[in-house]
Image (cartoon, rainbow, N blue to C red):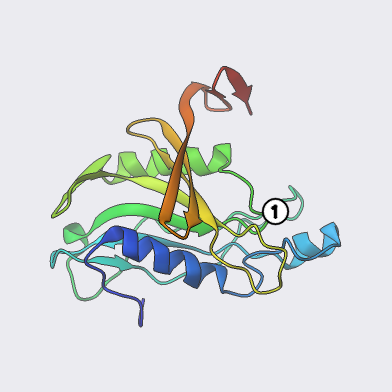
């Protein structure tokens, strides 16, 4: 993406990506009191954060393309392309780190989110080597807790299929506060267990 990075540190890239994505129109709709209107105008944006041969972290262009029947299912789900087209590099030289998106209503990661990153991990790599060490592929959902029309980056949820860990990161004055929400155990493709509770 033009005017974004590249970054030497992936945590800096995540912080900037969170602010950028949540600044997009209707990326957060918690301030809209009418739930039907909020659903209609909400928009989910997604992009890849990837690692280049120059040892930099870069974000792809954003897309807001959704599944055709999202409104019937009363949700927003951005369709993230499986590959990044960066003309500066050969496609096989890019390493996929984080699948990024926003949650307009600020909720946690869905079953579909987690299944998507598992499929991407099988397509790319479960863990990639970087100058900062080995980083496992993960999916991230940014959220804003504010009810203001201009949302702020308050944090994100992260699911890492290689470790099965689900985390919540909250932004504080001292930096990111990390909270472990548990480990995800898949019962089948429709059900996962988290902290002894089954979710569909």
State whether residue 15 is above or below residue 1.
Answer: above
Q: Quadrant of residue 49?
A: bottom left
Image location of residue 47, percent across then percent down: 43, 63
| Left or right position of 185 against 91 | right
Residue 79 visible somewhere in the drawing: no
Secondary structure at numbered mark 1: loop
Residue that numbered label 1 is attached to: 69
State whether residue 134 is above or below residue 162.
Answer: below
Picture residue at 63% right of the left edge, 75% below the top: 25
Picture residue at 71% right of the left edge, 64% below the top: 29
Picture residue at 36% right of the left edge, 53% below the top: 98
Image location of residue 132, percent across then percent down: 17, 52
Residue placed most toward the observer, 135 or 36:
135
| Left or right position of 156 against 120 | right
Image location of residue 100, percent across then percent down: 44, 57
Q: What is the crowding at mark 1: few (fewer than 14 residues within 10 Å), some, or many (at least 20)?
A: few
Residue placed most toward the observer, 117 or 142:
142
State whether residue 26 is above or below residue 74.
Answer: below
Residue 59 visible somewhere in the drawing: yes
Placement of the N terminus among the 4 image quadrants: bottom left
Q: In which quarter of the image is residue 183?
A: top left
| Left or right position of 37 against 163 | right
């Amino acid at each position: 993406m033009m005017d974004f990075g590249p970054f030497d540190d992936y945590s800096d890239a995540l912080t900037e990506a969170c602010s950028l994505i949540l600044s997009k129109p209707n990326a957060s709709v918690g301030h809209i009191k009418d739930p039907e209107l909020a659903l209609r105008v909400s928009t989910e944006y997604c992009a890849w954060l990837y690692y280049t041969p120059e040892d930099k972290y870069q974000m792809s262009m954003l897309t807001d393309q959704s599944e055709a029947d999202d409104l019937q299912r009363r949700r927003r789900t951005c369709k993230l392309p499986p590959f990044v087209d960066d003309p500066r590099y050969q496609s096989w030289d890019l390493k996929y780190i984080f699948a990024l998106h926003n949650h307009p209503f600020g909720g946690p990661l869905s079953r579909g989110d987690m299944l998507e990153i598992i499929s991407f991990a099988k397509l790319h790599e479960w863990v990639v080597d970087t100058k900062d060490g080995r980083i496992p592929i993960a999916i991230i959902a940014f959220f804003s807790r504010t009810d203001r029309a201009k949302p702020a980056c308050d944090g994100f949820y992260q699911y890492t299929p290689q470790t099965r860990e689900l985390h919540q990161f909250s932004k504080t004055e001292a930096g990111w506060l990390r909270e472990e929400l548990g480990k995800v155990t898949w019962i089948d493709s429709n059900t996962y267990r988290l902290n002894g509770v089954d979710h569909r």
